[in-house]
Image (tube, rainbow, N blue to C red):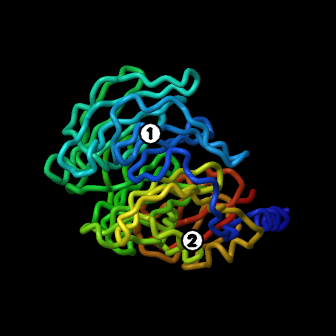
Amino acid sequence: MKYMITLIILISFQTELFSQWNQITAYGGGATYGAFSFVINGTAYVGGGASSQNFYQFDPANNKWIQKANFGGSGRDWPFAFTINGKGYVGGGDPTGQFTTLLNDFWEYNPATDIWTKKGDFPGAARDVPFTFVINGIAYVGGGFGANMTDLSDCWQYDSSTDSWTQIVNYPFACADPTAFVINNVAYISGGGYKNCYKFDPATKVFSAIADFPGDLRGPGLTLSVNGKGYVGLGENASFTTTYTDIWEYDPMKDQWKQRTDMIYPNTFSAFTTAFALDSDIYVGTGVNFASNQMTNQFYKFTLGSTLSSVEDVFPNEFNIYPNPAEDYLYVNTSEGQEIFIFNSEGNIVIETKYSGKIDIKGLENGIYFIRIDGKVNKFLVCR
């Protein structure tokens, strides 16, 4: 019986099937850069950018853009945007693109009525290009460019039910153009011209260091998560002279980055792009090319699919564990006191402990699990 369960899990376990970029219909709002985007209930919206108020919905089934009500505020580049409870929110940004005048007004979009409503202003310093993410219905905004291109470190959380902002712990250092993605209710922040990356736990309000970003320093043009992995790439250098087309994948189970050489972006208009994900499809578009000083309205799609594979292809044995399959206890060839993380097949941490000669796994249900020790990963089966 144990061997049958093992075989079923090995056959059903999946990993990426690499695809390619395909050009789709150009953005309906015209050539622009620094646009915002968000996804509401599986529908993507793109707007603003280059001091524009344009706002469009994307229809992937028919590969077309549908014009919606103009953004309620003034046109702007690089605002922050997020989604909570079926509504979109946009705030801050730069109305001139010159980093001299910044905004702190804040707007809500209701897709059911196609109406924008002004909310209370963002109470922090006016800014553009901060990081933003949403966990459990609460939005977080932090860092970014302040007045006179001053890097900021303050962080705020937003509760849409009360239209209220609360300042929380600062980001570990001031930085402009940081970006964030969320996996299993944990946020991961990178960019801002630094290799340092952090994860944020909303339960503790603590930023903890993770593996450094290994690519060139940049303000990323793409940051999102798909299928339990994070993706960061494209963008521009700090002097706005170089654009990048590479994309890097972050695995939170291994705390490792790797370059996705199959995902090199096919367009050199890769600075100040906007990006969103629908299911396993990544969409990237608009942007600017510094060499030509031209904007684009082109958009591309990349599909992250899946194919059958063995667990050994995905997670090679990097240290010894026994027994495997296991029932009540797991033993590892590591020193006592070593920090250990055990994840389920969905990437959620189910055990976090320090090794004391054995690991009590009686509370785990039957299934496949992954154990991470000092950045190395192994897998094991619980079978009773």
* Percent position of residue 313, x then y: 68, 77
Residue at 70% in and 62% down: 305
Q: Is residue 241 above or below residue 44?
A: below
Compare residues 111 and 337 and report the one nearer the observer.
Answer: 111
* Percent position of residue 127, x then y: 24, 44
Dot 2 crowding, Cα within 10 Å, few <14, some 14–19, many 20+: some
Lower position in the chain sequence, tag 2 or tag 1? 1
The answer, for residue 34, to whether it is visible in the render is yes
Residue at 35% in and 74% down: 216
Q: Quadrant of residue 307?
A: bottom right
Q: For marks 2 and 1, give the CA distance.
A: 25 Å
* Percent position of residue 46, x then y: 50, 43
Question: What is the secondary structure assignment of the residue under circle 2?
Answer: helix
Residue 263: mark: 2
Location of the N terminus by quadrant is bottom right
Residue at 39% in and 36% down: 90
Q: How many marks?
A: 2
The answer, for residue 324, to whether it is visible in the render is no
Amino acid type at image mark 2 = Met
Amino acid type at image mark 1 = Phe
Q: Is residue 33 left or right of residue 360?
A: left
Location of the C terminus by quadrant is bottom right
Residue at 38% in and 45% down: 132
Question: What is the secondary structure assignment of the residue under circle 1?
Answer: strand
Q: Is residue 260 above or below residue 276?
A: below
Callout 2 touching callout 1 (CB < 8 Å): no
* Percent position of residue 241, x then y: 29, 71
Compare residues 90 and 351 and report the one nearer the observer.
Answer: 90
Compare residues 208 and 351 and report the one nearer the observer.
Answer: 208
Q: Is residue 27 above or below residue 382?
A: above
Dot 1 crowding, Cα within 10 Å, few <14, some 14–19, many 20+: many
Residue 82: mark: 1
